[in-house]
Amino acid sequence: MTAKRVCVCRETPGSAVIMGDKPAAGKRTGETVAEDRPSAGQQEMAVAGSNVAGGKRAAIVLVEEDAGDREVLSGELSKRYGADYSIVVCAKPEELDLRMRELIAAGTPVALVIGGVGEADPDGIEVLAQIRAIDPTVVRVAAVRWGEWDTARPIFDAISMGKIDHWVTRPVQRPDEDFHQAITQFLGEWGSDQPGSFEAVQVIGEHWSARSQELRDTFSRNGIPIGFYDAGSDRGRQMLGEHRLESAELPVVVIRFDGQQSALANPSNLEIAEAFGLTTPIPAGDVFDVAVVGAGPAGLAAAVYASSEGLRTVVVEREAIGGQAGTSSMIRNYPGFAQGVSGARLAFAAYQQAWFFGTTFVFMRQPESLSREGDHYRLGLSDGSTLASRAVVITTGATYRRLGVPALEGLQGRGVFYGAGVSEAPAMHGRKIYVVGGGNSAGQAAMHLSKWAEQVTLVVRAPSLADSMSDYLIREIDAVPNVDVLYGVQVVDGVGTDRLELLVLEDRRTGTRRTVPADGLFVLIGSQPRTEWLGDNVAHDRWGFILTGPDLLDDSGASGQAGRPPLPHETSLPGVFAAGDVRRGSVKRVASAVGEGAVTIPAIHRYLEGMAMAVAGAR
Protein backbone atom coordinates (compact mmCIF):
# COMPACT_ATOMS: atom_id res chain seq x y z
CA MET A 1 0.00 0.00 0.00
CA THR A 2 1.20 3.49 -0.83
CA ALA A 3 1.70 5.65 2.23
CA LYS A 4 -0.24 8.88 2.56
CA ARG A 5 2.17 11.73 3.14
CA VAL A 6 1.46 15.08 4.76
CA CYS A 7 4.24 17.68 5.11
CA VAL A 8 4.00 20.23 7.90
CA CYS A 9 6.72 22.90 7.87
CA ARG A 10 7.86 23.70 11.39
CA GLU A 11 10.91 24.61 13.36
CA THR A 12 12.43 21.60 15.07
CA PRO A 13 15.10 21.50 17.77
CA GLY A 14 18.28 20.71 15.94
CA SER A 15 18.66 18.84 12.71
CA ALA A 16 17.27 15.41 12.03
CA VAL A 17 19.53 12.58 13.06
CA ILE A 18 20.34 9.83 10.62
CA MET A 19 21.94 6.50 11.53
CA GLY A 20 22.83 7.12 15.12
CA ASP A 21 24.08 10.64 15.86
CA LYS A 22 21.69 11.46 18.65
CA PRO A 23 21.83 13.71 21.70
CA ALA A 24 22.18 11.96 25.03
CA ALA A 25 18.83 11.32 26.66
CA GLY A 26 17.91 13.74 29.40
CA LYS A 27 20.51 16.34 28.47
CA ARG A 28 19.15 19.85 28.67
CA THR A 29 20.74 23.15 29.40
CA GLY A 30 19.61 25.40 32.20
CA GLU A 31 20.73 27.36 35.21
CA THR A 32 22.82 25.38 37.67
CA VAL A 33 22.04 25.80 41.35
CA ALA A 34 24.34 24.42 44.01
CA GLU A 35 22.72 23.06 47.15
CA ASP A 36 24.57 21.85 50.24
CA ARG A 37 22.62 19.56 52.53
CA PRO A 38 24.89 18.16 55.29
CA SER A 39 23.33 15.24 57.07
CA ALA A 40 23.71 14.09 60.65
CA GLY A 41 27.07 13.49 62.27
CA GLN A 42 30.09 13.48 59.97
CA GLN A 43 28.10 12.75 56.82
CA GLU A 44 28.55 15.08 53.91
CA MET A 45 26.49 15.51 50.80
CA ALA A 46 26.43 18.06 48.01
CA VAL A 47 23.93 18.40 45.22
CA ALA A 48 24.64 20.48 42.13
CA GLY A 49 21.91 21.08 39.59
CA SER A 50 18.24 21.88 39.54
CA ASN A 51 15.01 21.00 37.87
CA VAL A 52 14.58 22.26 34.35
CA ALA A 53 11.59 22.76 32.13
CA GLY A 54 10.17 19.51 30.86
CA GLY A 55 11.06 17.34 33.83
CA LYS A 56 13.81 16.27 36.18
CA ARG A 57 17.41 16.10 35.15
CA ALA A 58 19.08 12.76 35.61
CA ALA A 59 21.49 12.37 38.51
CA ILE A 60 25.06 11.14 38.78
CA VAL A 61 25.61 9.78 42.28
CA LEU A 62 29.06 9.51 43.84
CA VAL A 63 29.84 7.53 46.99
CA GLU A 64 33.43 7.89 48.22
CA GLU A 65 34.75 7.69 51.80
CA ASP A 66 38.17 9.30 51.30
CA ALA A 67 37.70 13.07 51.60
CA GLY A 68 40.52 13.91 49.16
CA ASP A 69 39.35 11.51 46.47
CA ARG A 70 35.78 12.61 47.02
CA GLU A 71 36.72 16.25 46.48
CA VAL A 72 38.61 15.52 43.26
CA LEU A 73 35.89 13.27 41.84
CA SER A 74 33.00 15.55 42.75
CA GLY A 75 34.88 18.55 41.38
CA GLU A 76 35.56 16.90 38.03
CA LEU A 77 31.98 15.66 37.76
CA SER A 78 30.44 19.02 38.70
CA LYS A 79 32.58 21.05 36.31
CA ARG A 80 32.01 18.81 33.31
CA TYR A 81 28.45 17.53 33.87
CA GLY A 82 26.84 19.88 36.40
CA ALA A 83 24.95 21.87 33.77
CA ASP A 84 23.13 18.79 32.50
CA TYR A 85 23.02 16.41 35.46
CA SER A 86 22.42 16.69 39.18
CA ILE A 87 25.62 15.63 40.95
CA VAL A 88 24.84 13.91 44.24
CA VAL A 89 27.77 13.16 46.56
CA CYS A 90 27.63 10.70 49.48
CA ALA A 91 30.47 10.49 52.02
CA LYS A 92 29.39 7.17 53.55
CA PRO A 93 27.98 3.99 51.99
CA GLU A 94 25.03 4.02 54.37
CA GLU A 95 23.86 7.29 52.79
CA LEU A 96 23.58 5.77 49.34
CA ASP A 97 20.43 3.71 49.83
CA LEU A 98 18.54 6.66 51.34
CA ARG A 99 19.64 9.13 48.66
CA MET A 100 18.83 6.73 45.83
CA ARG A 101 15.33 6.14 47.15
CA GLU A 102 14.79 9.88 47.67
CA LEU A 103 15.80 10.59 44.07
CA ILE A 104 13.54 7.87 42.71
CA ALA A 105 10.63 9.05 44.84
CA ALA A 106 11.15 12.57 43.49
CA GLY A 107 11.02 11.27 39.91
CA THR A 108 14.70 11.95 39.27
CA PRO A 109 16.28 9.22 37.13
CA VAL A 110 19.74 8.06 38.20
CA ALA A 111 22.15 7.52 35.32
CA LEU A 112 25.37 6.50 37.08
CA VAL A 113 26.45 5.51 40.54
CA ILE A 114 30.22 5.91 40.84
CA GLY A 115 31.64 4.22 43.92
CA GLY A 116 35.14 4.13 45.32
CA VAL A 117 36.79 0.71 45.38
CA GLY A 118 40.12 0.09 47.09
CA GLU A 119 41.90 0.52 50.39
CA ALA A 120 39.76 3.49 51.49
CA ASP A 121 36.54 1.76 50.36
CA PRO A 122 37.00 -1.94 51.22
CA ASP A 123 33.29 -2.72 50.73
CA GLY A 124 32.95 -0.64 47.57
CA ILE A 125 32.01 -3.52 45.27
CA GLU A 126 29.27 -4.77 47.58
CA VAL A 127 27.94 -1.22 47.99
CA LEU A 128 27.60 -0.93 44.21
CA ALA A 129 26.12 -4.42 43.93
CA GLN A 130 23.23 -3.42 46.20
CA ILE A 131 22.14 -0.75 43.70
CA ARG A 132 20.60 -3.39 41.45
CA ALA A 133 17.87 -4.09 44.03
CA ILE A 134 16.98 -0.38 44.11
CA ASP A 135 17.14 0.42 40.38
CA PRO A 136 18.52 -2.22 37.99
CA THR A 137 18.79 0.25 35.09
CA VAL A 138 21.49 2.35 36.80
CA VAL A 139 25.02 1.96 35.42
CA ARG A 140 27.33 1.04 38.33
CA VAL A 141 30.94 2.23 38.00
CA ALA A 142 33.85 1.32 40.27
CA ALA A 143 36.39 4.15 40.69
CA VAL A 144 39.93 2.97 41.50
CA ARG A 145 43.18 4.76 42.21
CA TRP A 146 45.96 4.70 39.66
CA GLY A 147 48.47 2.04 40.68
CA GLU A 148 46.21 -0.01 42.97
CA TRP A 149 46.67 -3.07 40.79
CA ASP A 150 45.46 -5.44 43.47
CA THR A 151 41.93 -4.21 42.82
CA ALA A 152 42.01 -5.45 39.22
CA ARG A 153 41.06 -9.08 39.80
CA PRO A 154 38.22 -8.36 42.28
CA ILE A 155 36.79 -5.79 39.84
CA PHE A 156 36.97 -8.12 36.83
CA ASP A 157 35.33 -10.86 38.89
CA ALA A 158 32.62 -8.43 40.02
CA ILE A 159 31.86 -7.49 36.41
CA SER A 160 31.65 -11.17 35.46
CA MET A 161 29.25 -11.79 38.34
CA GLY A 162 27.08 -8.82 37.46
CA LYS A 163 27.84 -6.88 40.66
CA ILE A 164 29.12 -3.83 38.77
CA ASP A 165 28.98 -2.73 35.15
CA HIS A 166 32.22 -0.78 34.56
CA TRP A 167 35.33 0.62 36.17
CA VAL A 168 37.26 3.87 35.78
CA THR A 169 40.55 5.21 37.07
CA ARG A 170 40.11 8.22 39.32
CA PRO A 171 41.32 11.52 37.80
CA VAL A 172 45.07 11.97 38.09
CA GLN A 173 45.18 15.47 36.59
CA ARG A 174 42.82 18.33 35.88
CA PRO A 175 41.19 17.99 33.48
CA ASP A 176 41.61 14.24 33.03
CA GLU A 177 40.24 13.55 29.57
CA ASP A 178 40.68 9.79 29.82
CA PHE A 179 38.41 9.84 32.87
CA HIS A 180 35.83 11.99 31.11
CA GLN A 181 35.93 9.89 27.96
CA ALA A 182 34.98 6.85 30.04
CA ILE A 183 32.24 8.68 31.96
CA THR A 184 30.76 10.05 28.73
CA GLN A 185 30.73 6.53 27.29
CA PHE A 186 28.87 5.23 30.34
CA LEU A 187 26.35 8.06 30.18
CA GLY A 188 25.80 7.32 26.51
CA GLU A 189 25.19 3.65 27.35
CA TRP A 190 22.59 4.61 29.94
CA GLY A 191 21.03 7.25 27.69
CA SER A 192 20.55 4.81 24.82
CA ASP A 193 17.99 2.97 26.94
CA GLN A 194 16.09 6.11 27.98
CA PRO A 195 13.42 8.08 26.16
CA GLY A 196 15.22 11.06 24.66
CA SER A 197 14.19 14.69 24.68
CA PHE A 198 14.62 14.76 20.89
CA GLU A 199 12.68 12.33 18.74
CA ALA A 200 13.75 12.26 15.11
CA VAL A 201 10.91 9.82 14.48
CA GLN A 202 7.55 9.41 16.17
CA VAL A 203 5.56 6.24 15.61
CA ILE A 204 1.83 6.27 16.41
CA GLY A 205 0.28 2.82 16.37
CA GLU A 206 -0.98 -0.13 18.36
CA HIS A 207 1.58 -1.16 20.94
CA TRP A 208 1.06 -4.90 20.46
CA SER A 209 1.31 -4.78 16.68
CA ALA A 210 3.92 -6.68 14.68
CA ARG A 211 4.52 -3.73 12.35
CA SER A 212 4.81 -1.24 15.22
CA GLN A 213 7.37 -3.51 16.88
CA GLU A 214 9.27 -3.93 13.61
CA LEU A 215 9.50 -0.16 13.19
CA ARG A 216 10.66 0.38 16.77
CA ASP A 217 13.30 -2.26 16.31
CA THR A 218 14.50 -0.97 12.93
CA PHE A 219 14.79 2.65 14.04
CA SER A 220 16.53 1.67 17.28
CA ARG A 221 19.04 -0.58 15.51
CA ASN A 222 19.83 2.21 13.07
CA GLY A 223 20.45 4.58 15.99
CA ILE A 224 17.57 6.95 15.16
CA PRO A 225 15.92 8.53 18.26
CA ILE A 226 12.33 7.31 18.31
CA GLY A 227 9.25 8.04 20.36
CA PHE A 228 6.34 5.59 20.35
CA TYR A 229 2.77 6.66 21.11
CA ASP A 230 -0.15 4.29 21.46
CA ALA A 231 -2.86 5.31 19.02
CA GLY A 232 -5.50 4.72 21.68
CA SER A 233 -3.92 7.08 24.22
CA ASP A 234 -4.90 10.73 24.61
CA ARG A 235 -1.53 11.85 23.27
CA GLY A 236 -1.70 9.43 20.36
CA ARG A 237 -5.15 10.62 19.31
CA GLN A 238 -4.00 14.23 19.65
CA MET A 239 -1.00 13.64 17.39
CA LEU A 240 -3.13 11.90 14.76
CA GLY A 241 -5.48 14.88 14.83
CA GLU A 242 -2.63 17.35 14.43
CA HIS A 243 -1.63 15.59 11.22
CA ARG A 244 -5.24 15.07 10.06
CA LEU A 245 -4.76 11.32 10.02
CA GLU A 246 -7.45 10.26 12.49
CA SER A 247 -8.73 7.59 10.11
CA ALA A 248 -5.37 6.66 8.58
CA GLU A 249 -4.11 3.12 8.43
CA LEU A 250 -1.75 2.48 11.33
CA PRO A 251 1.04 2.81 12.17
CA VAL A 252 1.66 6.46 11.33
CA VAL A 253 5.33 7.53 11.16
CA VAL A 254 6.21 11.20 11.72
CA ILE A 255 9.72 12.07 10.52
CA ARG A 256 11.39 15.28 11.62
CA PHE A 257 14.05 16.14 9.07
CA ASP A 258 15.48 19.27 7.48
CA GLY A 259 13.14 21.66 9.31
CA GLN A 260 10.01 19.75 8.26
CA GLN A 261 7.71 17.07 9.56
CA SER A 262 6.53 14.36 7.21
CA ALA A 263 3.64 12.19 8.37
CA LEU A 264 3.41 8.82 6.60
CA ALA A 265 0.45 6.47 7.00
CA ASN A 266 1.51 2.82 7.17
CA PRO A 267 4.69 3.42 5.14
CA SER A 268 6.96 0.72 3.78
CA ASN A 269 10.60 0.68 4.83
CA LEU A 270 11.55 1.98 1.40
CA GLU A 271 9.14 4.92 1.72
CA ILE A 272 10.70 5.75 5.08
CA ALA A 273 14.17 5.63 3.53
CA GLU A 274 12.98 7.97 0.78
CA ALA A 275 11.63 10.42 3.37
CA PHE A 276 15.06 10.45 5.00
CA GLY A 277 16.74 11.12 1.66
CA LEU A 278 18.55 7.77 1.63
CA THR A 279 17.50 6.64 -1.83
CA THR A 280 19.72 8.65 -4.16
CA PRO A 281 19.61 6.76 -7.47
CA ILE A 282 22.79 5.27 -8.88
CA PRO A 283 23.36 6.35 -12.50
CA ALA A 284 22.62 3.75 -15.16
CA GLY A 285 25.76 2.14 -16.50
CA ASP A 286 27.68 2.74 -13.27
CA VAL A 287 29.90 -0.23 -12.43
CA PHE A 288 31.38 -0.64 -8.94
CA ASP A 289 34.52 -2.59 -8.15
CA VAL A 290 32.89 -4.34 -5.18
CA ALA A 291 29.25 -4.85 -4.21
CA VAL A 292 28.75 -6.00 -0.61
CA VAL A 293 25.37 -7.57 0.12
CA GLY A 294 24.60 -7.14 3.82
CA ALA A 295 25.82 -4.62 6.41
CA GLY A 296 26.56 -6.93 9.32
CA PRO A 297 30.05 -7.12 10.86
CA ALA A 298 31.48 -9.07 7.89
CA GLY A 299 29.96 -6.75 5.31
CA LEU A 300 31.01 -3.57 7.09
CA ALA A 301 34.57 -4.88 7.47
CA ALA A 302 34.70 -5.74 3.77
CA ALA A 303 33.45 -2.25 2.93
CA VAL A 304 36.00 -0.54 5.18
CA TYR A 305 38.96 -2.43 3.71
CA ALA A 306 37.74 -2.25 0.10
CA SER A 307 37.08 1.50 0.19
CA SER A 308 40.25 2.29 2.11
CA GLU A 309 42.26 0.45 -0.54
CA GLY A 310 40.78 2.41 -3.42
CA LEU A 311 38.08 0.02 -4.59
CA ARG A 312 34.80 1.69 -5.49
CA THR A 313 32.36 -0.01 -3.13
CA VAL A 314 28.60 -0.21 -2.61
CA VAL A 315 26.78 -1.90 0.30
CA VAL A 316 23.18 -3.11 0.05
CA GLU A 317 21.30 -3.54 3.35
CA ARG A 318 17.71 -4.74 3.72
CA GLU A 319 17.08 -3.82 7.36
CA ALA A 320 19.62 -2.24 9.69
CA ILE A 321 23.37 -2.05 9.99
CA GLY A 322 24.95 -4.57 12.32
CA GLY A 323 22.95 -7.68 11.47
CA GLN A 324 22.35 -9.98 14.42
CA ALA A 325 25.30 -8.42 16.23
CA GLY A 326 23.53 -5.06 16.08
CA THR A 327 20.85 -6.38 18.41
CA SER A 328 23.33 -7.34 21.15
CA SER A 329 23.02 -5.04 24.15
CA MET A 330 26.57 -5.63 25.37
CA ILE A 331 29.47 -7.54 23.81
CA ARG A 332 32.22 -7.93 26.39
CA ASN A 333 34.66 -10.17 24.51
CA TYR A 334 35.27 -8.10 21.37
CA PRO A 335 39.00 -7.29 21.23
CA GLY A 336 39.90 -3.72 22.07
CA PHE A 337 36.82 -2.91 24.18
CA ALA A 338 37.80 -3.65 27.76
CA GLN A 339 34.55 -2.12 29.08
CA GLY A 340 32.40 -3.92 26.51
CA VAL A 341 30.49 -2.37 23.63
CA SER A 342 26.92 -2.65 22.38
CA GLY A 343 26.47 -4.27 18.99
CA ALA A 344 24.68 -1.19 17.66
CA ARG A 345 27.49 1.15 18.72
CA LEU A 346 30.13 -1.14 17.20
CA ALA A 347 28.20 -1.40 13.95
CA PHE A 348 27.61 2.34 13.71
CA ALA A 349 31.33 3.05 14.18
CA ALA A 350 32.15 0.65 11.32
CA TYR A 351 29.43 2.21 9.16
CA GLN A 352 30.86 5.68 9.73
CA GLN A 353 34.35 4.43 8.95
CA ALA A 354 33.26 2.87 5.65
CA TRP A 355 31.25 5.96 4.74
CA PHE A 356 34.22 8.24 5.43
CA PHE A 357 36.32 6.12 3.06
CA GLY A 358 33.73 6.64 0.33
CA THR A 359 31.47 3.57 0.49
CA THR A 360 28.02 4.05 -1.06
CA PHE A 361 25.16 2.61 1.01
CA VAL A 362 21.84 1.45 -0.44
CA PHE A 363 19.34 0.97 2.41
CA MET A 364 15.98 -0.76 2.68
CA ARG A 365 16.52 -2.76 -0.49
CA GLN A 366 17.17 -6.48 -0.62
CA PRO A 367 18.79 -8.56 -3.34
CA GLU A 368 16.53 -10.72 -5.48
CA SER A 369 18.87 -12.02 -8.18
CA LEU A 370 22.52 -12.36 -9.17
CA SER A 371 23.62 -12.83 -12.78
CA ARG A 372 26.75 -12.51 -14.90
CA GLU A 373 26.97 -9.99 -17.73
CA GLY A 374 30.30 -9.73 -19.51
CA ASP A 375 33.06 -8.90 -17.07
CA HIS A 376 30.77 -7.92 -14.19
CA TYR A 377 27.83 -9.14 -12.11
CA ARG A 378 24.38 -7.63 -11.90
CA LEU A 379 22.42 -7.54 -8.63
CA GLY A 380 18.67 -7.22 -9.01
CA LEU A 381 17.12 -5.36 -6.05
CA SER A 382 13.65 -5.42 -4.54
CA ASP A 383 12.79 -1.92 -5.82
CA GLY A 384 13.34 -3.01 -9.43
CA SER A 385 16.75 -1.37 -9.77
CA THR A 386 20.00 -3.12 -10.69
CA LEU A 387 23.56 -2.70 -9.45
CA ALA A 388 26.60 -3.68 -11.51
CA SER A 389 29.90 -4.70 -9.94
CA ARG A 390 33.09 -6.49 -10.95
CA ALA A 391 33.17 -8.49 -7.70
CA VAL A 392 30.56 -9.36 -5.09
CA VAL A 393 30.83 -10.18 -1.38
CA ILE A 394 27.80 -11.96 0.08
CA THR A 395 27.46 -11.17 3.77
CA THR A 396 23.71 -11.53 4.20
CA GLY A 397 24.22 -13.44 7.45
CA ALA A 398 21.64 -15.65 9.06
CA THR A 399 18.35 -15.15 10.79
CA TYR A 400 17.06 -16.91 13.88
CA ARG A 401 15.11 -20.07 13.20
CA ARG A 402 11.38 -20.03 13.84
CA LEU A 403 9.90 -22.09 16.63
CA GLY A 404 7.35 -23.52 14.25
CA VAL A 405 4.54 -23.28 16.83
CA PRO A 406 1.43 -21.94 15.03
CA ALA A 407 -0.12 -20.34 18.13
CA LEU A 408 3.08 -18.38 18.78
CA GLU A 409 3.68 -17.36 15.16
CA GLY A 410 0.36 -15.55 15.27
CA LEU A 411 1.55 -13.55 18.28
CA GLN A 412 4.75 -12.21 16.73
CA GLY A 413 5.20 -8.60 17.78
CA ARG A 414 2.53 -9.07 20.44
CA GLY A 415 4.70 -10.63 23.09
CA VAL A 416 6.67 -12.97 20.82
CA PHE A 417 9.89 -11.58 19.35
CA TYR A 418 12.60 -13.09 17.17
CA GLY A 419 15.93 -11.61 18.18
CA ALA A 420 17.17 -9.78 21.24
CA GLY A 421 14.46 -7.12 21.07
CA VAL A 422 16.62 -4.41 22.65
CA SER A 423 14.01 -1.78 21.75
CA GLU A 424 11.34 -3.75 23.62
CA ALA A 425 13.28 -4.26 26.86
CA PRO A 426 12.00 -1.16 28.73
CA ALA A 427 8.40 -2.21 27.96
CA MET A 428 9.05 -5.46 29.86
CA HIS A 429 9.19 -3.64 33.20
CA GLY A 430 7.89 -5.87 35.98
CA ARG A 431 6.96 -8.71 33.62
CA LYS A 432 7.77 -12.42 33.38
CA ILE A 433 9.95 -13.04 30.34
CA TYR A 434 11.26 -16.17 28.65
CA VAL A 435 14.30 -16.29 26.36
CA VAL A 436 14.80 -19.34 24.14
CA GLY A 437 18.36 -20.18 23.11
CA GLY A 438 21.71 -21.30 24.46
CA GLY A 439 24.18 -19.08 22.58
CA ASN A 440 25.82 -15.77 23.42
CA SER A 441 23.01 -13.76 21.82
CA ALA A 442 20.45 -15.43 24.06
CA GLY A 443 22.63 -14.88 27.13
CA GLN A 444 23.16 -11.20 26.32
CA ALA A 445 19.42 -10.76 25.75
CA ALA A 446 18.59 -12.39 29.09
CA MET A 447 21.03 -10.14 30.94
CA HIS A 448 19.72 -6.99 29.25
CA LEU A 449 16.08 -7.88 29.86
CA SER A 450 16.82 -8.63 33.52
CA LYS A 451 17.29 -4.89 34.12
CA TRP A 452 13.56 -4.35 33.63
CA ALA A 453 11.75 -7.68 33.92
CA GLU A 454 10.63 -9.09 37.22
CA GLN A 455 11.85 -12.52 36.17
CA VAL A 456 13.76 -13.80 33.12
CA THR A 457 13.90 -17.52 32.36
CA LEU A 458 16.37 -18.87 29.82
CA VAL A 459 14.99 -21.96 28.09
CA VAL A 460 17.77 -24.24 26.80
CA ARG A 461 17.28 -27.49 24.90
CA ALA A 462 20.75 -28.78 25.83
CA PRO A 463 21.73 -30.16 29.25
CA SER A 464 24.21 -27.29 29.82
CA LEU A 465 25.47 -23.99 28.41
CA ALA A 466 29.15 -24.90 28.47
CA ASP A 467 29.40 -25.86 24.79
CA SER A 468 27.42 -22.94 23.37
CA MET A 469 27.96 -19.85 25.55
CA SER A 470 31.01 -17.89 26.65
CA ASP A 471 32.12 -18.50 30.22
CA TYR A 472 31.81 -14.84 31.21
CA LEU A 473 28.13 -14.84 30.25
CA ILE A 474 27.44 -18.08 32.10
CA ARG A 475 28.92 -16.57 35.25
CA GLU A 476 26.89 -13.38 34.85
CA ILE A 477 23.68 -15.36 34.44
CA ASP A 478 24.46 -17.49 37.50
CA ALA A 479 25.02 -14.37 39.60
CA VAL A 480 21.86 -12.44 38.69
CA PRO A 481 19.00 -13.27 41.08
CA ASN A 482 16.13 -12.69 38.65
CA VAL A 483 17.51 -14.88 35.84
CA ASP A 484 16.79 -18.62 35.91
CA VAL A 485 17.85 -21.33 33.45
CA LEU A 486 15.75 -24.34 32.44
CA TYR A 487 17.88 -27.09 30.88
CA GLY A 488 16.56 -29.80 28.57
CA VAL A 489 13.33 -27.89 27.99
CA GLN A 490 11.59 -26.62 24.85
CA VAL A 491 8.60 -24.38 24.10
CA VAL A 492 5.86 -26.39 22.39
CA ASP A 493 2.77 -24.16 22.57
CA GLY A 494 1.39 -20.84 23.72
CA VAL A 495 -1.84 -19.04 24.49
CA GLY A 496 -2.88 -15.44 23.92
CA THR A 497 -5.60 -13.30 22.38
CA ASP A 498 -4.42 -9.73 21.96
CA ARG A 499 -0.96 -10.67 23.24
CA LEU A 500 1.01 -13.55 24.74
CA GLU A 501 -0.38 -14.84 28.03
CA LEU A 502 0.81 -18.41 28.57
CA LEU A 503 3.55 -20.76 27.38
CA VAL A 504 3.61 -24.55 27.34
CA LEU A 505 7.02 -26.00 28.22
CA GLU A 506 8.04 -29.61 27.63
CA ASP A 507 10.78 -31.60 29.34
CA ARG A 508 12.64 -33.17 26.42
CA ARG A 509 13.68 -36.22 28.43
CA THR A 510 10.38 -37.17 30.06
CA GLY A 511 7.87 -35.47 27.75
CA THR A 512 6.20 -33.86 30.75
CA ARG A 513 4.46 -30.58 29.94
CA ARG A 514 3.51 -27.63 32.10
CA THR A 515 1.84 -24.29 31.44
CA VAL A 516 3.40 -21.09 32.78
CA PRO A 517 2.31 -17.43 32.68
CA ALA A 518 4.47 -15.38 30.30
CA ASP A 519 4.39 -11.74 29.22
CA GLY A 520 7.16 -11.99 26.65
CA LEU A 521 9.05 -14.59 24.63
CA PHE A 522 12.33 -13.78 22.89
CA VAL A 523 13.56 -16.47 20.49
CA LEU A 524 17.26 -16.71 19.59
CA ILE A 525 17.80 -20.23 18.30
CA GLY A 526 19.95 -21.64 15.55
CA SER A 527 20.80 -20.05 12.22
CA GLN A 528 18.99 -19.96 8.92
CA PRO A 529 21.18 -18.43 6.19
CA ARG A 530 19.69 -15.69 4.05
CA THR A 531 20.51 -17.28 0.72
CA GLU A 532 17.08 -18.01 -0.74
CA TRP A 533 17.52 -15.18 -3.25
CA LEU A 534 20.50 -16.93 -4.84
CA GLY A 535 18.64 -20.06 -5.86
CA ASP A 536 21.08 -22.58 -7.31
CA ASN A 537 23.42 -19.96 -8.77
CA VAL A 538 25.89 -20.46 -5.92
CA ALA A 539 26.84 -23.85 -4.46
CA HIS A 540 25.58 -24.38 -0.91
CA ASP A 541 25.03 -27.20 1.54
CA ARG A 542 21.64 -28.74 2.32
CA TRP A 543 20.94 -26.09 4.95
CA GLY A 544 21.63 -23.22 2.55
CA PHE A 545 25.06 -22.16 3.86
CA ILE A 546 27.36 -21.10 1.01
CA LEU A 547 30.35 -23.29 0.13
CA THR A 548 33.65 -21.45 -0.29
CA GLY A 549 37.34 -22.13 -0.82
CA PRO A 550 38.48 -25.72 -0.23
CA ASP A 551 34.89 -26.93 0.26
CA LEU A 552 34.40 -26.44 -3.50
CA LEU A 553 37.40 -28.46 -4.69
CA ASP A 554 36.69 -31.64 -6.65
CA ASP A 555 39.05 -34.57 -6.90
CA SER A 556 41.22 -32.80 -9.48
CA GLY A 557 41.78 -29.81 -7.20
CA ALA A 558 39.74 -27.42 -9.34
CA SER A 559 36.42 -25.82 -8.55
CA GLY A 560 35.11 -26.47 -12.04
CA GLN A 561 34.16 -22.82 -12.59
CA ALA A 562 37.28 -20.78 -13.23
CA GLY A 563 39.70 -23.58 -14.11
CA ARG A 564 41.72 -22.77 -11.00
CA PRO A 565 41.49 -23.43 -7.26
CA PRO A 566 39.08 -21.00 -5.59
CA LEU A 567 40.51 -18.03 -3.76
CA PRO A 568 39.98 -17.67 0.02
CA HIS A 569 36.23 -17.31 0.69
CA GLU A 570 35.45 -17.44 -3.04
CA THR A 571 32.20 -19.20 -3.95
CA SER A 572 31.43 -21.42 -6.94
CA LEU A 573 31.07 -18.22 -9.00
CA PRO A 574 34.47 -16.65 -9.80
CA GLY A 575 34.67 -13.19 -8.27
CA VAL A 576 31.79 -13.81 -5.86
CA PHE A 577 32.85 -14.25 -2.24
CA ALA A 578 31.05 -15.05 1.00
CA ALA A 579 31.92 -14.12 4.58
CA GLY A 580 30.38 -14.28 8.02
CA ASP A 581 27.45 -16.38 9.19
CA VAL A 582 26.19 -17.04 5.65
CA ARG A 583 29.29 -19.14 4.88
CA ARG A 584 29.54 -22.82 5.80
CA GLY A 585 32.10 -23.40 8.52
CA SER A 586 32.15 -19.84 9.82
CA VAL A 587 32.79 -19.25 13.51
CA LYS A 588 29.77 -17.55 15.05
CA ARG A 589 31.61 -14.64 16.67
CA VAL A 590 31.61 -10.95 15.76
CA ALA A 591 35.40 -10.75 15.61
CA SER A 592 35.52 -13.78 13.30
CA ALA A 593 32.97 -12.20 10.96
CA VAL A 594 35.01 -9.00 10.84
CA GLY A 595 38.13 -11.01 10.03
CA GLU A 596 36.39 -12.94 7.26
CA GLY A 597 35.08 -9.73 5.70
CA ALA A 598 38.57 -8.25 5.72
CA VAL A 599 40.12 -11.41 4.22
CA THR A 600 37.92 -11.19 1.12
CA ILE A 601 39.51 -7.93 -0.04
CA PRO A 602 43.07 -9.20 -0.81
CA ALA A 603 41.39 -12.08 -2.66
CA ILE A 604 39.30 -9.59 -4.65
CA HIS A 605 42.45 -7.69 -5.58
CA ARG A 606 43.93 -10.93 -6.93
CA TYR A 607 40.73 -11.70 -8.81
CA LEU A 608 40.55 -8.23 -10.40
CA GLU A 609 44.23 -8.36 -11.32
CA GLY A 610 43.68 -11.73 -12.97
CA MET A 611 40.71 -10.37 -14.90
CA ALA A 612 42.76 -7.38 -16.09
CA MET A 613 45.59 -9.67 -17.24
CA ALA A 614 43.13 -11.90 -19.09
CA VAL A 615 41.64 -8.91 -20.90
CA ALA A 616 45.10 -7.61 -21.80
CA GLY A 617 46.15 -11.04 -23.05
CA ALA A 618 43.10 -11.27 -25.29
CA ARG A 619 43.96 -8.04 -27.10
Image: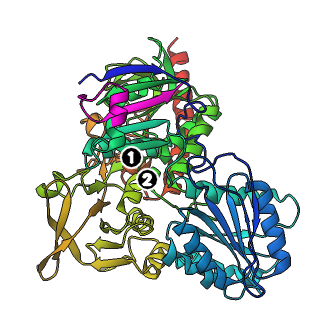
Residue on which disc 1 sits: 217
* Type of the residue with mark 1: Asp
Label ID, residue 327: 2
Label ID, residue 100: none
In magenta segment, residue 460? no
Tell me the colour scheme of the image: rainbow
Q: CA distance from mark 2 to mark 1?
A: 9 Å
Q: Earlier in the sequence, mark 2 or mark 1?
A: 1
Q: Is residue 28 above or below residue 239?
A: below
Q: Is residue 399 left or right of residue 493?
A: right
Q: Is residue 487 above or below residue 433?
A: below
* Type of the residue with mark 2: Thr
Is residue 154 something one can see in this rendering? Answer: no
- The boundaries of the magenta stretch are 238-258
In magenta segment, residue 247? yes
> In front: 83, or 286?
83
Residue shown at 49% from the left, 78% from the top: 133
Element type where label 1 sits in the image: helix
> In front: 168, or 500?
500
Residue 197 image offset from top left, x and y in percent? 54, 44
Element type where label 2 sits in the image: helix
Disc 2 versus disc 1: nearer the observer: 1
> In front: 614, or 593?
593
Residue 466 image offset from top left, x and y in percent? 40, 77
Q: Is residue 17 left or right of residue 144?
A: left
Residue 142 image offset from top left, x and y in percent? 67, 74
Which image quadrant is residue 393 in? Answer: top left
